[in-house]
Image: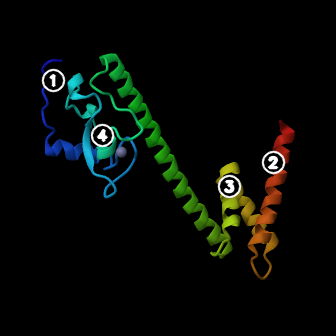
Amino acid sequence: MSKSSERVPVSKRQRFNIFARDGFTCRYCGKQPPHVTLVIDHVIPVSKGGTNDDGNLATSCNECNQGKSNIPLPDDSMSDMDSLRLAQDRLEKVTAAKLAIKACRAQEKLRDKIYDHVVELTGHDTWKRKNLSYLLNLFDEFGADKVAHWMSTSFVKTTKYTFNEDQFCRYLGGIARQVREREEALR
Ligand SMILES: [Zn+2]
């Protein structure tokens, strides 16, 4: 451990590789340039025997790296066990945050897709906010296949000459209610 505590600078090339691996995103708070300046963070500090191995390097914004964020960073006064535990804790948080960001992006993508589908089906692209979010919630609750099917039914049932989004959503809501009741009865 004595040898690795000499601080060897991380090469430019390795810095770039780590940034690229982490998607040029702070692994602690998820921020990206130009809002923040990215630096390389040693997950286990050099003073605690942390090396320049890729596995010990993480992309961090300046703020997180300086411990100004609310995620605690290991400090030199801690025992090795404590700082290891803290490092582990940080990595878990990072993983959780990453998953949350991923889920969020997937959700956004799904919402875009649903919106496209709704517009395509109805030819109506000036949705009231409340109706649109109602539709999106239905997709969340019942899944895309079911709701897409119900939407076709609602569209056929409620549209003769002109499309009325309120009527369309009311009809859809009626179907959803019936399905909910049926599922409840089965329980
Ligand atoms: Zn950060």
**What SS does tag 2 mark?**
helix
Query: In the image, 112: left or right of 73?
Result: right
Mark 3 and mark 4 in contact (Cβ < 8 Å)? no
Q: Considering depth in this image, is 175 or 86 the residue closer to the camera?
A: 86
Mark 2 and mark 1 in contact (Cβ < 8 Å)? no
**What SS does tag 1 mark?**
loop
Foreground disc of the pair 4, 3: 4
Query: In the image, 44: left or right of 107?
Result: left
Query: In the image, 85: left or right of 50?
Result: right
Q: Above or below — where is 144 with respect to 165?
A: above
Q: Which residue is mark 4?
A: 65
Q: Determine the CA span between mark 1 and mark 3.
A: 53 Å
The answer to which of marks 1 and 2 sits earlier in the sequence is: 1
Query: In the image, 172: left or right of 15?
Result: right
10 Å crowding of disc 4: few (<14), some (14-19), many (20+): many
Question: Residue visible at 43% across and 31% down?
Answer: 92
Q: Determine the CA span between mark 4 and mark 3.
A: 39 Å
> Which three-letter amino acid code belongs to the residue tagged 2?
Arg
Q: Which residue is mark 3?
A: 137
Foreground disc of the pair 1, 2: 1
Position of the C terminus by quadrant: top right
Q: Which residue is mark 1?
A: 4
Position of the N terminus by quadrant: top left
Q: Position of residue 37 (x, y in %)?
A: 27, 51
> Which three-letter amino acid code belongs to the residue tagged 1?
Ser
**Is ligand 1 within 8 Å of the beta carbon of the residue shown at mark 4?**
yes
Q: Position of residue 66 (x, y in %)?
A: 29, 40
Q: Which residue is mark 2?
A: 180
Question: Residue visible at 83% across and 41% down?
Answer: 184
